[in-house]
């Protein structure tokens, strides 16, 4: 039996290859994701380890687990006075305060230096034993007007010692003299990030931290262990809001923090890999069903000759196992190629990730092999069992019994459908955490897909009739034959189409959802942004320097400006974190909120302990004006806030989705200094265009990575960001669609093979090759349109369902009809592409051989 | 009567070297219009090969074939396909029909392929003749073997081809159904002036022919009037010893 299986696999190399691809792509995505994220982790790990090499103990501001923001420092820096206190501790050889902050380094052309989007930093020069930088040219900066650059940046930008380098910091642009070039450890750059090294004082100034340091690095005296010193330093700083760690612990913490952030990326990418594997399972199932049916006679003959059911089952299962294993190995190796491709995809769409040599963990190999093999074997199980039911007598009978028994009453499918919808509802309205809800929704969607796939053989005939009618009118006999061929075996067509349905449904869902999101955001901007311009980072999400707001305030024609700052917090009595928005008192001049209880005047008087809660965003027991909230901030402080009013902002509004407090509180207690954005109102003292021009000029000169946008521009840039994300999701979903296209190729190829004699007869009586090709092509179009139309319908239903709970939050459901139509057209075209190979094979059949074919 | 199909010095060699088989070893033969010719011969004598070469389905190794005045050598695949579609009718031993089409759709297939509409009166008459009037919308799976073969005959005649080739059209049928098919072929010659070339193993089938051609080892070993079944039998015994 084993050698028979091997021989039958070898004799059908093409089919084996096509079947494998169904699994290869998904496995490649999974292993590629692991390789990519492991590689990113590794390259940062190296950086962090190098960064703490000579550091025995590090003192940093205390932060609360889970409340660290993902952009910029949230912790209030340490006062510089602490450095002396640490230095005085017994056993300390050297203690030095360091400052690092994001800046924008300008190239010779005046443009920002970006290496694949990696950030630019200003860092203070440090004692030789702490700093990872080694000077290859020149010397360490010693005066405030001097700077050293990392070797890569200096080389790429063509800077030579003595050149002037422009650097934009918190207080605007300034020019420095290049006095040194340094390597990071023994590499030219740190994962592509650019570094400007400066004196401590200048770094403090440029990053807006005068009199403060981010971290105090400590070296122990001979004979004092890092652990011991850590204890002593901690005792000396008792009561200060600091965290004391050994150098190793600090490096590990940075690594694990990063891992957590990367965790989201990894999960998201794995989901797309999982979808591709799920779709692949359909293709595998179908291929095995068809081959078992086509081999009915062969199997029956084996049974007649005395093969047991077990041997037949084992044969098919072994075939699946071998294909699965082969596909997994190829897919895993493919992941190595995919990882850089993913990085490329991200950067093409404006999301840059650092890279290094591929890291292949044992886990990557194991998961890839297990997933691919298990899914393949599972998907082939039903056809394998069906193979065992082949009666020996079937050897004598003509006919393919594939799909038999599928016309039983659809109890199971209906049950699945109900269960799937139940899971979706539980996810939407069950009130679970974000992660739980997402898992329930994902599982629900998968179960619904399965149920629809099981029900779809019943839909094939009517759908094929509907789609086939115009094709028949257009193409006559070819259209008729294509339709008839597509419905000849409804189960086969249904599963083939269902594989495509999944991808199309997800694309449809995402595009409907994105359209709704776009509309909702635009509506919110239109309603609430009553100022003249909004000022934000050119990347659309990073915070902006603190110096921007005062600089704008000085421009004649500017009436008021208000900063918005974001943070996370924990509120007693609330599980999970609560978003915090800090606003200036002037906010009412340029932003109009919606209220349940209160008015915009309340925004002016929040003071040191006032808070506004949102109707619909639960913050424990606090519901009404006068209630108090016990809030833990990211810097570990506890503050008690009193509810002054109740907003009624939706999740798409700037002040929605969390609680609102004053700038004073969010900067002091939460440690958030940089605004996320400013909203600015102009007065009528001079033409508004003139004021706008003055703002633009000032920003261009002093803060080149900050820009102003009027309401239309803001809406446009928001749409653009959503569009970018959408493009990324489309690209990732394309993988699943490609898998399903291979399913179409496979099904068609097998069907063509099965109809060899028919095709021979057609050719003999005068069907041209073109006509034969067209018949196959149109069958593919019908199949793919069946899948696509089911997919669009499912996508619409999903969108309707998922947007329900969001409607209260101001989500406006809109159907991007044009996009959905394009989706259908693209599916039809994809069908044509999938049919190229099978159609060519059908047309190439030798007429005489086909006629003699047995 | 002019010749509708002619073959001159036709050879067809399969394989190469010592393993080569000469399925046709120099066949020169002409088929006059409006006649029914039966081709007989032992298994492997080259009957099917000859028919395939005459019909433009196979390319001879050497020699030439003209069909309805067209020299087949050098025609492109497309031209050959269209020639078959427009000027040739086929009846095979089995698997003549497309299972997804109805009987009537199968019959009109050659016309549909050419993008032509059938002449309704002629179609009705044809279906009447093959006695399938009440089976027009049935699929092949719902028809008996004999009925299926009658559909095939009707399809071979529907576009009034220059010549109909039938390769053992009764090979799979019982004697009653065979009789019906042979009668149909005979009538197509007598009533419609059709030219029919039929390969058969059955002396009774050959007996309805106007002319009998016998092949052995890729050569024509007898060419003459068919006569009745006994005479055919006689000829066969003599020439294929
Ligand atoms: N494709 C092929 N390759 C090799 N040899 C072939 C091929 N087709 C036919 N032959 C050989 O050519 C010879 C003639 O075959 P052909 O099919 O014409 O015989 P036939 O007279 O129709 O026989 P039958 O009565 O059995 O149908 C035979 O020896 C056969 O083996
Ligand atoms: Mg033959």
Image (cartoon, coloured by chain):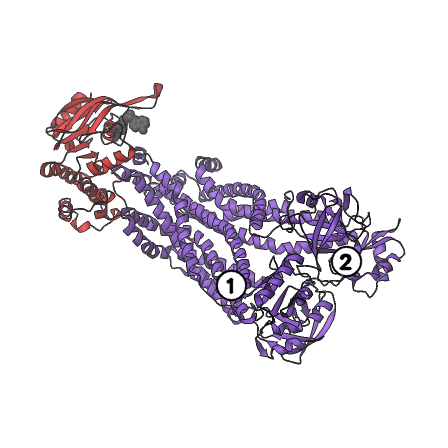
Chain colours: A purple, B red
**Relative height, residue A829 to residue B241 (above, below):** below
Relative image position of residue A273 (x, y in whole percent): 54, 51
Near-viewer residue (A319 or A484): A484
Residue A817 pos. (x, y %)? 42, 60
* A66 or A610: nearer the viewer: A610
Q: Earlier in the sequence, mark 2 or mark 1?
A: 2
**Residue A422 appearing in the image:** no
Q: Residue at horizontal 32%, vertical 53%?
A: A468
Subunit ID for the residue under disc 1: A
Compared across the picture, whether A749 is left or right of A250 comes to left
State which quadrant residue A673 falls in: bottom right
Q: Which residue is mark 2?
A: A204
User: Does mark 1 fall on the same chain as mark 2?
Assistant: yes
Image quarter (top left, top right, bottom left or bottom right) of the C terminus of chain A: top left
Tell me if mark 2 has few (under 14), some (14-19) or many (20+) residues whose alpha carbon lies within 10 angstroms of its own.
many
Q: Quadrant of ligand 2?
A: top left
Residue B66 shows in the view: yes
Host chain of mark 2: A
Q: Which residue lies most toward the front here?
A: A686
Q: Residues within 10 Å of mark 1 (few under 14, many from 20)?
A: many
Residue A445 placed where, x, y %?
A: 49, 59
Determine whether, in the image, residue A497 is placed left or right of residue A259: left
Where is residue A696 shown, x and y percent of the image? 61, 61
Secondary structure beneath dot 1 equals helix
Q: In front: mark 2 or mark 1?
A: 2
Q: Residue at x 17, y 47 (%)?
A: B132
Q: Is mark 2 within 8 Å of ligand 1?
A: no
The image quarter containing residue A155 is top right
Q: Where is mark 1, residue-wise?
A: A518
Q: Which residue is at a point 32% across and 50% down the rendered structure image? A: A483
């Amino acid at each position: 039996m084993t050698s028979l299986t091997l021989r039958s696999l070898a004799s059908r190399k093409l089919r084996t290859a096509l079947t494998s691809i169904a699994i290869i792509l998904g496995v490649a995505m999974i292993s590629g994701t692991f390789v990519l994220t492991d590689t990113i982790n590794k390259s940062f790990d190296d950086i962090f380890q190098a960064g703490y090499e000579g550091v025995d103990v590090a003192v940093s501001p205390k932060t609360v687990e889970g409340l660290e923001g993902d952009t910029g420092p949230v912790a209030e820096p340490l006062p510089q006075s602490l450095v002396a206190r640490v230095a005085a501790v017994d056993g300390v050889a050297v203690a030095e305060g360091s400052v690092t902050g994001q800046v924008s380094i300008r190239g010779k052309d005046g443009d920002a230096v970006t290496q694949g989007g990696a950030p630019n930093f200003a860092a203070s020069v440090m004692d030789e034993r702490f700093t990872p930088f080694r000077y290859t040219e020149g010397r360490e900066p010693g005066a405030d007007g001097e700077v050293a650059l990392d070797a890569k940046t200096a080389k790429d930008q063509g800077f030579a010692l003595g050149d002037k380098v422009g650097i934009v910091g918190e207080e605007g642009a300034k020019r420095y003299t290049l006095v040194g070039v340094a390597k990071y450890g023994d590499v030219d750059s740190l994962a592509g990030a650019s570094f400007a090294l400066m004196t401590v004082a200048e770094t403090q100034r440029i990053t807006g931290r005068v009199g403060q340091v981010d971290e105090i690095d400590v070296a122990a005296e001979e004979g004092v262990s890092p652990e011991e010193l850590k204890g002593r330093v901690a005792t000396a700083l008792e009561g200060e809001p600091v965290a004391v760690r050994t150098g190793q612990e600090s490096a590990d913490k940075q690594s694990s923090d990063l891992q957590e952030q990367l965790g989201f990326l990894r999960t998201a990418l794995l989901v797309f890999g999982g979808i591709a594997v799920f779709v692949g399972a359909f293709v595998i199932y179908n291929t095995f069903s068809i081959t078992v049916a086509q081999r009915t006679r062969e199997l029956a003959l084996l049974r007649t000759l005395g093969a047991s059911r077990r041997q037949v089952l084992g044969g098919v299962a072994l075939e699946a196992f071998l294909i699965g294993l082969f596909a997994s190995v190829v897919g895993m190796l493919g992941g190595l190629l995919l990882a850089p491709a993913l990085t490329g995809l991200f950067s093409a769409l404006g999301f840059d990730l650092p890279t290094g040599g591929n890291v292949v963990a044992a886990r990557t190999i194991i998961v890839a092999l297990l997933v691919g093999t298990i899914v393949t074997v599972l998907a082939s199980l039903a056809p394998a069992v069906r193979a065992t039911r082949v009666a020996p007598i079937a050897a004598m009978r003509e006919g393919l019994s594939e799909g038999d028994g599928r016309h039983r009453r659809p109890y199971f499918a209906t049950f699945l459908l109900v269960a799937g919808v139940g899971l979706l509802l539980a996810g939407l309205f069950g009130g679970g955490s974000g992660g739980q809800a997402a898992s329930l929704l994902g599982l629900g969607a998968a179960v619904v897909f399965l149920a629809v796939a099981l029900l779809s053989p019943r839909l094939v005939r009517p759908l094929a009739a509907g789609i086939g009618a115009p094709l028949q009118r257009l193409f006559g006999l070819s259209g008729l034959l294509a339709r008839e061929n597509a419905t000849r075996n409804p189960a086969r067509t249904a599963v083939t189409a269902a594989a495509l349905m999944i991808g199309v449904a997800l694309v449809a869902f995402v595009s409907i959802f994105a359209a709704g999101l776009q509309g909702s955001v635009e509506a919110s901007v239109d309603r609430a942004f009553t100022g003249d311009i909004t000022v934000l980072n050119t990347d659309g999400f990073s915070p902006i320097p603190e110096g921007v707001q005062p600089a704008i305030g000085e421009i004649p024609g500017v009436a008021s400006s208000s900063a918005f700052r974001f943070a996370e917090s924990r509120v007693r009595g609330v599980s999970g974190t609560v978003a915090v928005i800090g606003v200036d008192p002037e906010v009412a001049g340029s932003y109009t909120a919606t209220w349940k209880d209160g008015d915009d005047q309340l925004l002016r008087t929040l003071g040191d302990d006032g808070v506004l809660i949102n109707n619909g965003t639960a913050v424990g027991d606090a519901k009404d004006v006068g209630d108090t909230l016990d809030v833990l901030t990211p810097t570990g402080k506890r503050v008690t806030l009193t509810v002054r009013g109740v907003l009624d902002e939706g999740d798409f509004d700037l002040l929605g989705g969390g609680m609102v407090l004053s700038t004073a509180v969010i900067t002091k207690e939460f440690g958030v200094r940089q605004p996320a954005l400013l909203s600015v109102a102009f007065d009528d003292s001079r033409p508004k265009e003139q004021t706008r021009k003055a703002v633009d000029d000032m920003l261009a000169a002093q803060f080149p990575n900050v820009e102003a946008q009027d309401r239309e521009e803001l809406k446009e840039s928001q749409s653009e960001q959503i569009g970018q994300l959408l493009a990324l999701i489309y690209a990732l979903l394309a993988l699943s669609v490609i898998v399903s296209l291979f399913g179409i190729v496979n099904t068609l190829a097998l069907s063509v093979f099965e109809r060899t004699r028919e095709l021979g007869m057609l050719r003999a009586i005068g069907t041209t090759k073109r006509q034969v090709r067209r018949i196959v092509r149109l069958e593919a179009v019908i199949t793919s349109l069946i899948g696509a139309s089911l997919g669009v319908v499912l996508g619409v239903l999903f969108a309707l369902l998922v947007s329900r709970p969001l409607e209260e939050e101001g989500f406006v459901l809109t159907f991007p009809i044009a996009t959905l139509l394009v989706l259908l057209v693209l599916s039809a075209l994809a069908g044509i592409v999938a049919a190229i190979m099978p159609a060519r094979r059908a047309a190439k059949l030798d007429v005489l051989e086909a006629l003699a074919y047995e | 009567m002019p010749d509708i199909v002619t073959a001159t010095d036709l050879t067809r060699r399969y394989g190469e070297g010592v393993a080569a088989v000469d399925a046709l070893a120099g066949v020169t033969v002409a088929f006059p219009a409006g006649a029914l010719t039966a081709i007989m011969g032992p298994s492997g004598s080259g009957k099917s090969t000859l028919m395939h070469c005459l019909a433009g389905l196979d390319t001879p190794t050497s020699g030439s074939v003209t069909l309805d005045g067209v020299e087949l050598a050098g025609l492109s695949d497309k031209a050959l396909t269209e020639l078959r579609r427009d000027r040739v009718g086929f009846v095979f031993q089995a698997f003549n029909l497309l299972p997804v089409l109805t009987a009537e759709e199968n019959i009109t297939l050659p016309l549909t392929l050419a993008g032509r509409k059938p002449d309704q009166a002629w179609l009705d008459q044809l279906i009447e003749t093959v006695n399938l009037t009440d089976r027009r919308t049935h699929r092949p799976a719902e028809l008996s073997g004999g009925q299926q073969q009658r559909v095939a005959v009707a399809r071979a005649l529907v576009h009034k081809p220059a010549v109909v080739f039938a390769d053992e059209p009764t090979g799979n049928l019982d004697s009653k159904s065979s009789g019906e098919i042979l009668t149909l072929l005979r009538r197509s010659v007598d009533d419609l002036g059709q030219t029919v070339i039929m390969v058969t193993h059955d002396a009774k089938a050959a007996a309805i022919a106007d002319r009998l051609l016998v092949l052995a080892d890729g050569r024509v070993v007898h060419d003459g009037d068919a006569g009745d079944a006994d005479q055919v039998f006689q000829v066969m015994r003599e020439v294929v010893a």
